[in-house]
Structures are given as structure tokens and as C-alpha cells.
Image (cartoon, rainbow, N blue to C red):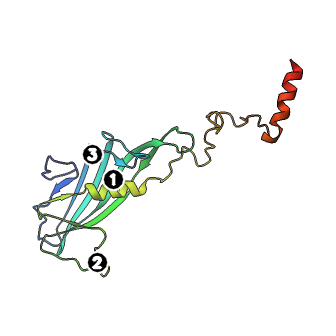
Amino acid sequence: MSHHHRPAASPYMFSMRELVRRPGEQRQASESFPAPAVLGTDVIGVPEGANVELSASFESVSEGIWAHGTVAAEAVGECSRCLDEVRLEVNPSFQGLFTYPDKQVDDEEGEPEDVYEFDGDVIDLEELVRDAVVTSLPFIPLCDPDCPGLCDQCGARLADDPEHTHEVIDPRWSALQGLTETKES
């Protein structure tokens, strides 16, 4: 369990006072809280208020604080083929370096990835967690990889009726169809 003073602003914020500028010092934190905002995309995501389990390790290094851990939650969305609800357990890991305001991290390609600013007091893991969750979610959520979707004629769920069909008249014969309908009456 966690043994730290956490600012009330966000469940993703952790005080680093006891680790700052003490290379080699480490600390673990484990939190469970309702998601303060949606974590995900318009198609699928962890809904606001859903339970989020956050497990993090913090290590003081010369440039700042190295943070890594995992987040576990349930994402909810809809199947992009049949529109049924999709529920998906997500458990991505995250990592990042939070640099002190006076430290520069050299990177050959300019702006390094996984490096975040840190005021020297409080670390906010929200961006790290959000990025980890979003990249772990499917781009096109499906209730089942073989979901047949909906009928393009009437919208019926094809999984419920695999034999579902519509009589399709070739438009070239539609004029003749009118002849048979008048003879029958």
C-alpha cells in the first residue's frame, strides 16, 4: 500500500520530497481510485468513475525521478461491426523520466520520448497513464474477431441469424418483375 502524502488535486499526483536529489533512493506506490476522466478514445475507453488500479515505482536518478509501473482497468466501447458493447481488461505498463527543472537530457533527435518536466516536488503520472492506456486499446474494437456485423439492407445482427439473406433482384430484370406482378392479380 502507499505511504506518501498525495496532493488532493489528482489521484495521479505523487509527492517526491523524500526522493528528490537522493540518487539510488526508491519508493513504491499502489493506488485504487475511480477514473477522474475518460482514459481512451471516442470509440473505446475506461469510463469516468470506473475503477483504476495504479502500481508505480519511483527511483531517484541524477537527472530527476524515473517512474515506471502498470495500470489496470476495464475499457468499455462498442463493436465497430455490430455495435454491441465491448468490455476489455487493459493492463499496460508505463515508464518515464521526470527531469529536474535545471537538468537537460541530451538526445540526438531533439525532444526525447518518455521525458517529462518535474517541478522538483510533485510528479503527475496522468499523461504517462493516459498514453499507456490509449496505445493499448484496439483501434477498431470488436466483440469477436469473427463478428459478421449487421445486415447492410435491414440492420439485423448477422451473428443472431447466420442464414439471414434478402432476395436481391438484378436491376436489369426489374422491368420484367412488373409484368409478373400484374399477371398474378
Secondary structure of the residue carrying tag 1 is strand
Q: Residue at x 13, y 65 (%)?
A: 19
Q: Is residue 78 left or right of residue 12?
A: right
Please report whichever mark, 3 or 2, sits nearer to the chain's N-terminal start. 3
Q: In front: mark 3 or mark 2? A: 2
Secondary structure of the residue carrying tag 2 is loop
Residue type at mark 1: give it.
Val
Marks 1 and 3 sit apart, C-alpha to C-alpha, by: 10 Å
Q: Which mark is residue 141?
A: none
Residue 125 spot, x, y in % from top left? 24, 57
Q: Tell me which corner region of the image, top left, top right, bottom left or bottom right, holds residue 181.
A: top right
Q: Residues within 10 Å of mark 1 (few under 14, many from 20)?
A: many
Please report whichever mark, 1 or 3, sits nearer to the chain's N-terminal start. 3
Q: Residue at x 33, y 53 (%)?
A: 71
Secondary structure of the residue carrying tag 3 is strand
Residue at image mark 1: 71
Please report whichever mark, 2 or 1, sits nearer to the chain's N-terminal start. 1
Q: Which mark is residue 110?
A: 2
Residue at image mark 3: 32
Marks 3 and 2 sit apart, C-alpha to C-alpha, by: 36 Å
Residue type at mark 3: give it.
Ser
Q: In front: mark 2 or mark 1? A: 2
Residue 152 spot, x, y in % from top left? 64, 39
Q: The C terminus appears in which quarter of the rendering? A: top right
Q: Residues within 10 Å of mark 3 (few under 14, many from 20)?
A: some
Residue type at mark 2: give it.
Gly
Relative height, residue 117 to residue 83 (above, below): below
Q: Is residue 9 left or right of residue 107?
A: left
